[in-house]
Image (cartoon, rainbow, N blue to C red):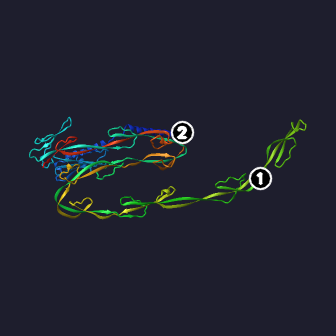
Amino acid sequence: MEIERRNSNFIRDILVKIVLIVLFVFLLMFVFPMPNLTTFYDAVFNNNVQTMKDAAEDWFTTERMPKEVGAQETLTLQEMLDKKLILPFLDKDGKECDTEKSYVTVKKEEKEYILKVYLSCNGKSDYIIEPIGCYNFCPEGNCTVPLVETNPTNGQVTVKVPTNNKITNNTTTPTPGSKYKLQYLYKRTLKSGTWVEGSWQTSKEKESSTVKLVDTRTQYTGQKKVSKGTTLYKHIKYSYKNNWTHDTDWTDEVKTISDNLKLYAKRTLYTGRKKTETEEIKYKHVKYAYKDNWETLGWSTTKRKTSDTVKLVDTRYTVRKTQNNTTGTWSSWQKDYTWRSSRPANTSSKQWGDAWDTSSSSSWNVVGDITSRSTLPSISGDTKYEFLYSKEEACYSDCGGKSKVKIYYYRKYKKSTTYSYRYQYRTYSTKTSTSTDEKVVSNPSSYTSKGYKIVKTEYKYKINNREKYLADTKWTTSSTPPSGYEYTKEKTKSIIIKYVNLGKWVSNTSKLGEYTEDVATRVQYKYRYNNPEKYISDTVWTTSQTSPSGYTYTGEKKTNTKTSYADLGKWVNSKSELSEYTYNIEKRTQYKYKYYNSKTKTESKWFDKDPGGDWVYANQTRKIKID
């Protein structure tokens, strides 16, 4: 008892320490909630993009710029590091960005250059596009870069242009006979965002402009007494937690919004065509494809890796059970030579029969002392008497007139006969034999639960022997075949009038240039996806194999050999739901918050004068021809 008491105290002390540690961790989470680092991560990414952009503008001087319209020059992030144009930088997780996928390109257009900066870091990628106007890249070679001054007091930017042009409110008026005018590049930052509701949590956060409290609730859990010798069964409960990701690329697909699919961003693009007369040479290209040809294989114990061309059709199992069969027989009757007063009791391995021999012995036993007025009684059958003594004693009845009579004292004996027996007996013996039962089944679980073992597993697959065929023919204006096509060496030549597509989508109609015919619009989207992750959220031991609602029995059980307390294993929203778990009741408060996810976008545009508002001068100018 003393050992059991010490063990009980030791387990109780361990449980108390564990509870105190858990309470301390929850207190730390409540006092120091996890900050929202989304804004910080975006700032790190934007700073890295700006670093690449600044270094590229210094590198692409006149001799390094593309010379032909439509040509472009590329400088990767690795080349920038090798040339010591920038120092190495890390992303928000402290990892290096992809130095081969990240790059800067400069493409020559008819009137300007287009600078594109693309950065890819650990699953996040984005880019910015900026027109490069009149520096030392102007085709005329005689433009003048305006002087930019910044007021150190209020940070206001003033653009001073050459004296041969008159500017009022940053507006350039060309002198008589001039064929050019100056334009100024301005930038602005557009901000947007959405509110996302989080899950229940025990830590309390400080409310702010990006964090709002939505709801609170109080939950309870407790214990119940479990009697000595109770068998407990283990059950587990699975839950799911949100795991949101979003598209990095735009898509034209309109998807149905649901709890696990949300709209992340939306934009409208424009494209158009212009009329041209060209001499066109077309080249013939062909594309080959493959069609499915599935073949089902026979049963095999070899397990294959499934893919687009290998599919598992069926599985079967060979199960086997070996069992022992025991039979028993009784021997013939034998004589036992031990004298016994009675027949022994039968056992499972030995039985006693009738007596085969009998013997007897007699003896006289004292029964008691008696008195008599007469002389010694005679022996009668199994009774005899022994005279002890006689004496005169007073007489009170039937005395014949005498005051005293003579009394005789005797000892009485009884004769007893003891019988002994010798009995017959026989013994029981067993014999064990072995038998084997083997079956081929598709579902082995019902057999393995009865003691069968899986001795062989067989699989049936189907494989796809794909057949090649001519899927498409395409004529293009280049001998270089499109992706997936082969050039046939066949070509045609013609002079045609056609409408040339802009070949790209732009963010507003002012960027269409000459491509103002058949203007088309295109709406693109980015979506957020929730792929809930499954995890074991709770474990509970109960006295029944039938699992509580929402739980699954694990097959594990144990016997509680002493009185203890069993946890409810879950939190409920009221004390009435605790049922018999009314001991050591605990209470917790949970909170649900919604979070504001902000997003910023930089927009650049050329203006003839300061547009005002939230537009900021980007320290760039260009000279354009006036028709």
In the rendered image, is residue 65 in sight?
A: yes
Locate residue 581 relative to residue 78 in the image: left or right.
Answer: right
User: Which of the 4 image quarters holds residue 90?
Assistant: top left
What kind of residue is marked 2? Answer: Arg
Disc marking residue 360: 1
User: As drawn, which residue projects farthest toward the right?
Assistant: 401
**Local crowd size for mark 2, using a 10 Å CA cut-off: few (<14), some (14–19), many (≥20):** few
**Local crowd size for mark 1, using a 10 Å CA cut-off: few (<14), some (14–19), many (≥20):** few
Residue at horizontal 69 percent and vertical 58 percent from the top = 334
Percent of width and height locating residue 194:
31, 44
User: Compared to 523, does 329 lie above or below?
Assistant: below
In the rendered image, is residue 121 in sight?
A: no
Percent of width and height locating residue 626:
13, 48
Q: Nearer the viewer, residue 362 or 172?
A: 172
- Residue topped by disc 2: 5
Percent of width and height locating residue 221:
46, 41
What kind of residue is marked 1? Answer: Ser
Disc marking residue 181: none
Q: CA distance from mark 1 to mark 2?
A: 62 Å
User: Compared to 269, does 36 lie above or below?
Assistant: above
Q: Nearer the viewer, residue 101 or 484?
A: 484
Locate residue 344 relative to residue 469 in the image: left or right.
Answer: right
Residue at horizontal 69 percent and vertical 52 percent from the top = 344
Q: Secondary structure at mark 2?
A: helix
User: As drawn, which residue projects farthest toward the left?
Assistant: 177
User: As drawn, which residue projects farthest toward the front?
Assistant: 518
Tell me the quadrant of the picture where the N terminus can be found.
Answer: top right
Percent of width and height locating residue 434:
55, 60
Q: Secondary structure at mark 1?
A: strand
